Image (spheres, grey):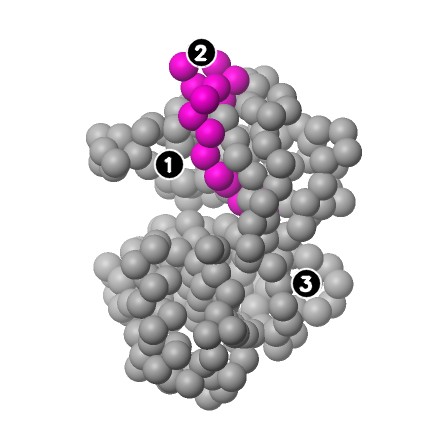
């Protein structure tokens, strides 16, 4: 793994931070890919975890958008994201090689839950830059309005092709509830197109079954395997 340094951190929601890192010389990746990060401090160097690039490959720095999972609230987590959120510019991380299976295969419907939006962000930004975002739609599920990552940017990117749904809050202008078969039928007519899925494991598994029941082909479902 290569050394890199934190240049900037800032909150994008109450529990999600943007991290800007130095980009190692010659480092490259494809939108939708991830890499392993570890903290270059005693006791943390071997605790590597995967995170998705949200910057573009041609950018001079690397960007990651990372949600914190405090151990007091999420005992199944090992505390790395909580530790990351306490780091400051100048602290060092270790970065591995890019990997991942969420690659853009053409226009379709992106369905994300919570921090599962992150693999899609670089894809959206690349498509926008190339003028190829037209024909895509995003359905994004969160618990509450304050949990929505990069809402202004997503609204700017997708306009009327954005559906935001809240599972634990009712707010005017937002759908309420999980991404269900009824919700999909309300907003979609064509189930023969590509579907890009990312979010909690149970959500992705349920969506695969729901979409196939609605007529989608298993080969049109793109998700992290």
- Please give the range of residues in magenta: 39-54
Of labels 3 and 1, earlier in sequence is 1
Give the camera-side residue of 124 and 98.
Answer: 98
Residue 56 placement (x, y as % from top left): 68, 47
Q: Quadrant of the N terminus?
A: top right
The residue under the point 67% across, 50% down is 30
The residue under the point 62% across, 30% down is 21
Of labels 1 and 2, earlier in sequence is 2
From mark 3 to mark 2, how far is it between C-alphas? 40 Å
Above or below for 127 versus 11: below
Closer mark to the observer between disc 3 and disc 2? 2
Identify the residue under disc 1.
Answer: 68
Q: Is residue 36 left or right of residue 105?
A: left
Q: Is residue 168 left or right of residue 136?
A: left
Residue most extreme to the top: 42
- Residue 222 drawn in magenta: no
From mark 3 to mark 1, how far is it between C-alphas? 28 Å
Give the SS element for disc 2: loop
Identify the residue under disc 2.
Answer: 42
Identify the residue under disc 3.
Answer: 127
Give the SS element for disc 3: helix
Give the SS element for disc 1: loop
The residue under the point 55% across, 55% down is 101
Q: Quadrant of residue 131?
A: bottom right
Of labels 3 and 2, earlier in sequence is 2
Q: Main secondary structure of the magenta part?
A: loop
């Amino acid at each position: 793994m290569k050394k890199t340094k934190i240049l900037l951190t800032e909150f994008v929601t109450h529990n999600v931070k943007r991290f800007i890192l130095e980009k190692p010389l010659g480092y490259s990746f494809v939108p939708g890919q991830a890499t392993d990060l570890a903290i270059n401090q005693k006791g943390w160097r071997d605790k590597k975890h995967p995170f998705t690039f949200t910057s573009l490959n041609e950018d001079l720095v690397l960007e990651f958008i990372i949600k914190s999972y405090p151990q007091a609230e999420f005992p199944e987590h090992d505390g790395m994201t909580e530790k990351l959120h306490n780091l400051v510019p100048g602290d060092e991380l270790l970065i591995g090689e890019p990997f991942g299976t969420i690659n853009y295969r053409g226009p379709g419907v992106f369905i994300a839950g919570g921090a599962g939006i992150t693999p899609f962000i670089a894809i959206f930004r690349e498509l926008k830059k190339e003028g190829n975002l037209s024909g895509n739609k995003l359905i994004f599920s969160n618990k509450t309005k304050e949990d929505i990552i990069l809402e202004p940017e997503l609204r700017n990117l997708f306009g009327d092709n954005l559906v935001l749904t809240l599972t634990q809050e009712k707010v005017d202008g937002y759908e309420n509830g999980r991404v269900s078969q009824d919700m999909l039928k309300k907003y979609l007519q064509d189930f023969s197109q590509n579907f890009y899925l990312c979010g909690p494991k149970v959500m992705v598994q349920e969506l695969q079954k729901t979409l196939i029941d609605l007529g989608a082909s298993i080969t049109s479902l793109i998700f992290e395997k």
